[in-house]
Amino acid sequence: MKILRKMLVLIILCIYLAILTKLVLFKYITLHEIINHFNFTYDEYHWRSNNFVPFKTIYFYLFLAEINLSIRIENLVGNVIGFSPLGIILPSLSRKFQKLAVIMLTTFCLSLTFEVFQLIFEFGSFDVDDLILNTLGGAIGYLPFKLLKYFFKKKR
């Protein structure tokens, strides 16, 4: 029964990662256009569209942007919510992931991988604030797992 549960969680993780990859890397392009993005020709605009300054984008969306509130929420909260399932799925899969620091490091590494792919292959733009928000999302997702574990342990 334990192996069946692990297999189910592993399948859920694979589906989640496939959906997350589509939403993060390929949100603006169709699957047919992906191959055209695997080139290494950069123009000046590409490098200017990236953000390497922590909290610059977060500050912009919170205080400076004169855009629709739903766009602000989508960009800030979406990054948090998008990575929060990792905080639930990974500890369910293995005991190695049952510490907050490990979840945060894993979430950060996955997010960094996505951001570097966006930078290199121009699937979007690199934003250090996405790393911050995504890592926060993994940590927030870990809270329900920890609470459920605490309540089940207390019940026994």
Image (spheres, rainbow, N blue to C red):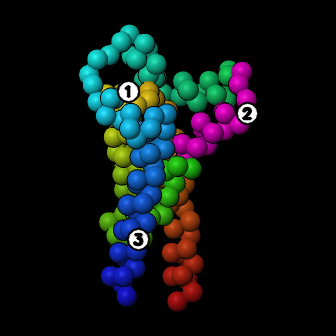
Q: Nearer the viewer, residue 71 or 51?
A: 71
30 relative position to 68: left or right: left
Kind of residue indicated by mark 3: Val
96 relative position to 125: left or right: left
109 relative position to 81: left or right: left
Is residue 19 highlighted in magenta?
no
Q: Earlier in the sequence, mark 3 or mark 1?
A: 3
Q: What residue is shown at x 51% (from left), y 82% (from top)?
A: 153
Specify few, some or many for label 1: CA neighbours under 10 Å numbering under 14, 14-19, or 20 or more: many
Q: What residue is shown at x 36% (from left), y 56% (from top)?
A: 102
SS label for mark 2: helix
| Structural distance between the alpha carbons of marks 1 and 2 | 27 Å
Percent across and percent down for residue 39 are: 27, 25
Per the image, the residue denoted by label 3 is 9
Q: Which residues are magenta?
A: 66-80
Q: What residue is shown at x 52% (from left), y 89% (from top)?
A: 156
Percent across and percent down for residue 71 are: 66, 33
SS label for mark 3: helix
Q: Does residue 144 sit above or below 82 in this rendering?
A: below
| Tag shown at residue 69 | 2
23 relative position to 36: left or right: right
Per the image, the residue denoted by label 1 is 122
Kind of residue indicated by mark 2: Leu
Q: Quadrant of residue 47?
A: top left
Residues marked 1 and 2 touching at CB (< 8 Å): no
Q: Nearer the viewer, residue 17 or 98?
A: 17
Kind of residue indicated by mark 1: Glu
Name the residue at the left extreme: 40
Q: Nearer the viewer, residue 7 or 59?
A: 7
| Structural distance between the alpha carbons of marks 3 and 2 | 35 Å
Residue 93 seen anywhere in this rendered image of the structure: yes
Residues marked 3 and 1 touching at CB (< 8 Å): no
